[in-house]
Image: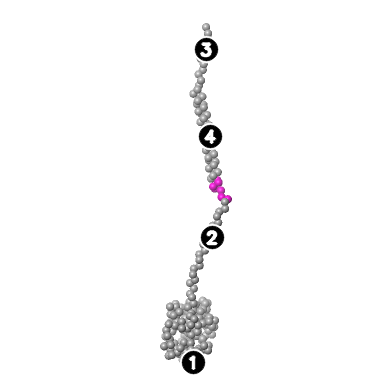
Amino acid sequence: MTAPQPPKPRLRRPVLWISIAAGLVIAFGAVAAGYAVGAGSSKSEATEASAKPSTRPEPEASAPTVPLPEPSEEPVSVIPAECSGIYTTDWSTQLDGYVLNPAWAAEDRNSATSDDELNAIVKAGDPLRCQWGHESGGSDRSLKTAVVAVTAEQSAAVLARLQVLDFSCYEELGGTRCVLEEDDDNGTWGESHFVRDGVWIATRWMNMAPDGYTHDIVNTLWP
């Protein structure tokens, strides 16, 4: 009688499949980890690259716009070319027939001020000289005016000198007015000086001082 064969062992196929599945999971995990590491490294490199200063030349900043200069507000000289331009009043009707700048007045060297220091400033400024007198010649009545352009320093010097000479000075018509009146053997004489905006109006009179004369000149030059 033949002895019975021992039973063959069964293949443990489930164990094999589990092993294969586990291997695949490990393999996929390794690939995913590698991808994550690579992505993280790329992101880090990109961040570092963006943090580094660019070596590309930056465009030059445009030059700042220079504002155009404002129009000058310096006043244009108000001194006219002729004596007729400093009056609006016809003073000949109030001066007993005296006329403006008679022919002989060109030879008269007397100034519109009696002070030598002030007269030097008048002459230096090439003034407009205006004189009222009788056509036949000079007399004991006269009225002389000089209109001259002066610098700020000259204006200050004129006013300071007038105060030294005991003129009465006060603010008037947008400027400074200084006046003086005296009596002597020849009668009554005086001077009136007005300084404003670089212009000096100097007037000297003898026995003839029409009211409003200086005001007329000021209101004509600065209407």
The mark that comes first in sequence, 4 or 1, is 4
The three-letter code of the residue at mark 3 reads Gln
| Tag 4 near tag 3, CB within 8 Å | no
Residue denoted by label 4 = 31
Q: What is the span of residues highlighted in magenta in the rendered image?
A: 48-55
C-alpha gap between disc 2 and disc 1: 71 Å
Disc 2 secondary structure class: loop
Which secondary structure lies at badge 3? loop
Q: Position of residue 98 (x, y in %)?
A: 45, 89
Q: Name the residue under label 3.
A: 5
Label 1 crowd (10 A; few <14 / some 14-19 / many >=20): few
> Tag count in the figure?
4
Q: Name the residue under label 1.
A: 137
Is residue 168 visible in the rendered image? The answer is: no
In three-dimensional space, the C-alpha distance between marks 4 and 1, rounded to whole angstroms, equals 127 Å
Marks 2 and 4, the one that precedes in the sequence:
4
> Which residue does the numbered mark 2 point to in the structure image?
63
Of 200 and 164, nearer the camera is: 200
Q: Residues within 10 Å of mark 3 (few under 14, many from 20)?
A: few
The mark that comes first in sequence, 2 or 3, is: 3
Q: Pointer 4 and pointer 1: residues touching (CB < 8 Å)?
A: no
* Sequence-first tag of 3 and 1: 3
Check disc 2 and give the amino acid type.
Ala
Amino acid type of the residue that numbered disc 1 sits on in the rendered structure: Gly
Is residue 125 covered in magenta?
no
